[in-house]
Amino acid sequence: MERTRRSTGARARVPLTTALAVVLGLLAQGAFLSGTAHAAGPVNVSGACAGQNAEVVEATAPPSTIYQAWIGCGGIGYARSTDGGATYGGAVEMPGSAGAWDPAVAVGPTGIVYVAYMLSSGGFEYPQVSASFDQGATFTQTNRDDNNASNPTFTRYDDVALS
């Protein structure tokens, strides 16, 4: 599988297995979730998603929750682990993410999980953010920021920053 990143209209490709291997390597070493169970080997997080999957991003929350989002599942795929990566819940497509790219995920201090991604419409690109108020179990609020779509100098970024 390949990773897609838009910059000048061209697409650069990186194998998903490379990104997944890095994530799983960190889990196996206990790099960020000390004292919790870890996967003994690779865990197929996106196996239930048809087609190709790429560009894995993740966020963590104590004591042992891992949130992952990626390009896949027909849009932006998402899954979470509550046991330090030993197992994951079923992968799902984020609401309204068909055709999306460039995922980002973050978890706030109160446990709200945000998954952002880029969409395009009418020749313009804009970020969309979905929020979960139950530690990533469901995403009940989705907002798109296409207010600047009529401004051709609008710079697109979907990274999530929390304070």
Image (tube, rainbow, N blue to C red):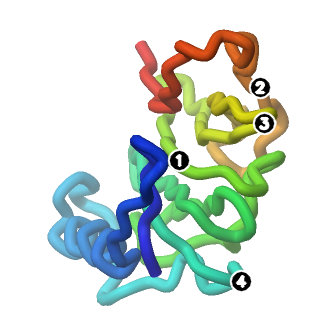
Quarter of image, res 146: top right
Pair 3/1: label in front? 3
Judge by depth and name the residue closer to the eye, 34 or 72.
Answer: 72
Q: Is residue 40 left or right of residue 69?
A: left
Q: Position of residue 107 (x, y in %)?
A: 50, 34
Q: Residue at x 50, y 57 (%)?
A: 68
Identify the residue under disc 3.
Answer: 121
Q: In whole angstroms, how far apart are the C-alphas of marks 2 and 1?
A: 15 Å
Q: Amino acid at mark 2?
A: Asn
Disc 4: which residue: 50
Tell me, yes or no, if residue 61 can be seen here. no
The residue singled out by tag 2 in the image is 143
Taking the spot 74% from the left edge, 61% from the top edge, the residue there is 93
Could you tell which of marks 2 and 1 lies nearer the N-terminus? Answer: 1
Marks 4 & 3, CB-CB < 8 Å contact: no
**Residue in front for this viewpoint, 138 or 125:** 125
What's the CA distance linking mark 1 and mark 4? Answer: 18 Å
The span from disc 2 to disc 4 (Cα, nearest Å) is: 26 Å
Q: Is residue 97 left or right of residue 114?
A: right
Q: Earlier in the sequence, mark 1 or mark 4?
A: 4
Residue at 64 percent of width and 32 percent of height? 125
Is label 3 in contact with label 2 (beta carbons under 8 Å)?
no
- Give the Cα separation between the discs numbered 3 and 2: 15 Å
Give the mark, 2 or 4, whose residue is nearer the N terminus. Answer: 4
Please state which of the two labelled residues, at mark 3 or mark 2, is closer to the viewer.
3
Q: Secondary structure at mark 1?
A: strand
Q: Which residue is mark 1?
A: 103
Give the image location of residue 25, x and y in percent.
Answer: 21, 74
